[in-house]
Amino acid sequence: MRGALTGALIFEGLATDEASAEALITSGEVELAPCHEHDSVGPMAGATSASMMVYVVENVTHGNMAYSNLNEGYGKVLRYGAFSEEVIIKLRWMNDVMGPVLSEALKMSDGLDVRALLAESLHMGDEGHNRNKAGSIIFTAKLAPFIAQACSDNNTAAEIIRFLGENALSVLNPVMAACKAMADAAHGIEGSTLMSVMARNGTDLGIRVSGLGDQWFTGPVGQPDGLYFPGFTAEDASGDIGDSTITETAGIGAFAMAAAPAIVTFISGTPQDALNATMEMYEITTAEHTHFTIPALDFRGTPTGCDIRKVVELGITPRINTGIAHKDAGVGQVGAGLVRPPMSVFEEALLAYADKYLS
């Protein structure tokens, strides 16, 4: 998080290095706030600064909007706390060159149906969080003709299409925004015990509950259990981080692992583990998604709507698929794996629910 904030301030021209960024933040001149408090989400460190272009996703049924920044791909990237010159150069290209073209392309396309895209990608081996290879290909294919039309320079159009097509996570950010738009529509329902937000900042994990307003219930983040890149071990890992658990909140990600058996090659385990993960999540959810279905389970809908009562009663916490960041700012991603939130946040939320509705 510190590395991403440093990079965001350098990107904005407000700082020149880590020391000047830290001085600016600790002086109180920079306002920091959770993405979720601004109808927004960002993967991993998730930093979104004032000048960054964002995807805008509309829930056309309920009329609410959600936002997410643009995905940088793999390697040394801002979302994993890297802020070297190459990171800033890429961010500025994305913002100044790719972003305006994508904006025009999306206007020409009259928008993309992210829910339909997700439904199709789940039938092609994605789970919508750590594995988005199929979804990113669909996303690129749908936009490519409009990018070609929107961009007057063929070389630039080719560069943008190549960047999107070669990045297996291109679609993650608009998918996250779509999940945020879905989950926010379920927030603020009187008496509801559904979890409507789950997010982490590298130190704490927080949830919000639909019937409990904007109160956060927080506890310490876990250490992901997974596969590490060569040269790295669990001792190098930061605590779990990011807003991408909005995918699990909406019923995909680790909740839909049965649709993506190949994901275990990235996060460890076996295809049976992926199946077991989804089956366990049916125990703590209230519904099966009518649009997101799993071929391996006879097209059963993904488990959706995590109920804090069931979590506490059964002693089963939600599963989370996650990337693993290095504990030191600037290094970047060191692996990927699985983690769970602390039970304490659900117990605290349930007690608050009892105080509000049953006392």
Image (cartoon, rainbow, N blue to C red):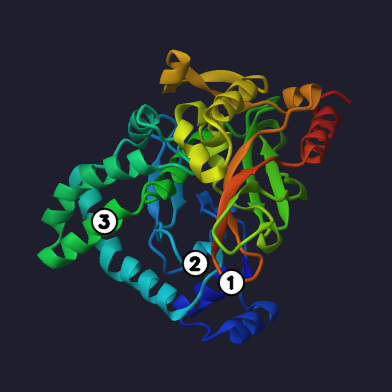
* Residue 78 marker: 2
239 in relation to 291, above or below: below
Q: Residue at x 50, y 72 (%)?
A: 8
Query: CA gap, disc 1 to disc 2?
Result: 7 Å
Query: Looking at the picture, which amino acid does disc 1 mark?
Result: Gly
> Mark 2 or mark 1, which is nearer the start of the sequence?
1
Picture quarter with the N terminus: bottom right
> Mark 2 or mark 3, which is nearer the start of the sequence?
2
**Mark 2 closeness class: few <14, some 14–19, many ≥20 residues within 10 Å:** many
Image marks 1 and 2: residues in contact by CB distance under 8 Å: yes
**x, y (%) of residue 168?**
37, 49
Picture quarter with the C terminus: top right
Q: Which residue is mark 3?
A: 102
Instruction: Classify mark 1: helix, strand or loop.
Output: helix
> Mark 1 or mark 3, which is nearer the start of the sequence?
1
Q: Residue at x 58, y 36 (%)?
A: 269
Query: Looking at the picture, which amino acid does disc 3 mark?
Result: Leu
Does any portion of residue 311 appear in the rendered image? yes
**Mark 1 closeness class: few <14, some 14–19, many ≥20 residues within 10 Å:** many
Identify which residue, 288 or 132, lies in the foreground.
Answer: 132
**x, y (%) of residue 233?**
65, 59
Q: Which residue is mark 1?
A: 3
Q: Residue at x 47, y 68 (%)?
A: 76
**x, y (%) of residue 167?**
35, 54
